[in-house]
Amino acid sequence: MISKRLLLGDEAIALGAIHAGISGVYAYPGTPSTEITEFIQNNAPEVRSRWCTNEKTAMEAALGMSYAGKRALVCMKHVGMNVAADAFVNSAITGVNGGVVVLAADDPSMHSSQNEQDSRFYGKFAMIPILEPSTQQEAYDMMPYAFALSEQMRLPVLMRVVTRLAHSRAGVQSVTPIPQNALNPDNERTHWVLLPGNARRQYASLVEKQPQLMASAETSPYNKVCGEQKATLGVVACGIAYNYVMENEPEKRGIPVLKVSQYPLPEQAIKALAAQCDTLLIAEDGQPIAEEQIKAMVGADYPIKGRLTGDLPRMGELTPDCVGAALGVVTDEGLPAAKSVVARPPALCQGCGHRDVYDALNKVAKEYADARIFGDIGCYTLGALPPFRAIDSCVDMGASITMAKGAADAGVHPAIAVIGDSTFTHSGMTGLLDAVNDGANITVVISDNLTTAMTGGQDSAGTNKFEAICLGLGVEPEHVRVVVPLPKNMEEITQIIREEIEYNGVSVIIPRRECIQTLNRKLRQKRAQQ
């Protein structure tokens, strides 16, 4: 049965995965990937879909499902690829049984991220196929194709999207779903046991597959040439950049375009395009990975334009206008200038418990000349902005505790770490264990709002377990303190912070109060049911 729906790119990916017969989706929430798993949770109860503690555990669970012969989808934002990298890279060496697709949602322009790394580098590094849809329809269509390719090549497949595709809508036509694979655990042990002898054989097998992967890219239905005439300028357009190129109507200017949505790069098609053009423009939304490879393919003397040459911006998202300028398209002139709008930076919600935590920390920190507060990744990172200006660092998931430890090792006192509940179970527990084992003189604040608030209120893996976790890691029971962050409790909270700062060792303070947004949603749902 064929039907058409208006879907976000993330939702199209999710629906495509459901229709491709997945048995599990494994993910940690992170913008712009979160809606994929949420859609599956809300629309496919037959698919295993509980949130994972972090991206590494998600990747490993998907490998376990693949080992059992079933199809699994792994979802994360681009920085999550760093967390999953150990399992991800080794999955190319073990290979797969049931199909595995790893969905990485990149964030050019860093709308909600610390960097704008390009996940295609990970796919190239692991030597596996990469798919990069240009539209929501293509994102849907690629899912069954990706799982079939994964099982055909017995390799995981990386699918890379960007924010503009993930969070924009279009009509998507769906087709009849494929049933889930039958349970079929792999009986071949050697390629799953990566002892050096086995790993060397498996790596050799991966290298031997590279010509097949290149041949698949050359004949892929997602790599195509539009216009074949000889021209002064030709374009290689990757993923969503193809849309920006086509919006500038290259066919009217006699500009041939090679659309690339499957990697490895189709070398023969690129060389054929270069042979009929004097110059190539490489349009890709991300880092200049294709531009660098194509320059190596066609030779140093062949003129290549792109992000490295300044013809396209070196940083941030591409736009139809900047691509049009690189194509020599004159944009409309004489339009009225937009009125200046005062920027409104994001802020912690009114009524948020994090506000009371920062009020208390700031009050106590002023009593110490050299106090330093190390922050972490979450909505509480907004404590770096006015009116609080409370945190001195925010680097990556879990870094607050280990940076506080390192600073304390260097002699900083007090060294205070502020970390959220979900981030603590994602990446903070190991840092706390390091601090306990070394007897570090730090105070850790686990600001517990009972949810993964920054990405929309998903379940937090450690809810109602934090005291037990801290005790299990070796924090002394009398130095695991729980408070309720409310203005009326400010005197108690500040006194507890002072006491734990003065303790020469690892102490943990857990301010616990439900996220105001999650609470409001629950109250609205309750009223609606009455």
Image (tube, helix red, strand yellow):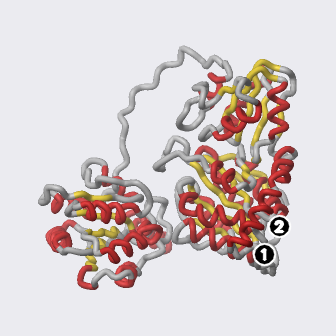
Residue at screen point 80% across, 27% down: 274
Q: Is residue 92 or residue 419 the one in the foreground?
A: 92
Residue 184 in sight from this viewpoint? no
Instruction: Give neighbour class at mark 1: few <14, some 14-19, many 20+ (Cα, 10 Å).
Output: many
First in sequence, mark 2 or 1: give its number: 1
Tag 2: amino acid: Ile
Instruction: Give neighbour class at mark 2: few <14, some 14-19, many 20+ (Cα, 10 Å).
Output: few
What element does badge 2 sit on?
loop
Quadrant holding the N terminus: bottom right
Residue 192 position, x and y percent, is 72, 74
Residue 72 position, x and y percent, is 71, 68
Q: Work out which residue is located at the far top of the displayed protein and give it.
A: 334
Q: Are marks 2 and 1 in contact (CB under 8 Å)?
A: no
Q: Work out which residue is located at the far front of the displayed protein and give it.
A: 197
In the image, which disc is placed on residue 44? Answer: none
Residue 519 position, x and y percent, is 40, 68
The residue tagged 1 is 69
Residue at screen point 77% across, 54% down: 142
Residue 103 position, x and y percent, is 65, 57
Residue at screen point 47% across, 65% down: 457
Q: Is residue 129 or residue 454 the one in the foreground?
A: 129
Q: Work out which residue is located at the far left of the displayed protein and give it.
A: 367
The quadrant in which residue 281 appears is: top right
The quadrant in which residue 193 appears is: bottom right
Tag 1: amino acid: Gly
What element does badge 1 sit on?
loop
Residue at screen point 47% across, 68% down: 426
Image: 204 above or below 297: below
Label 2 to label 1: alpha-carbon separation: 15 Å
- Between circles 2 and 1, the one closer to the viewer is 1
In the image, which disc is placed on residue 178? Answer: 2
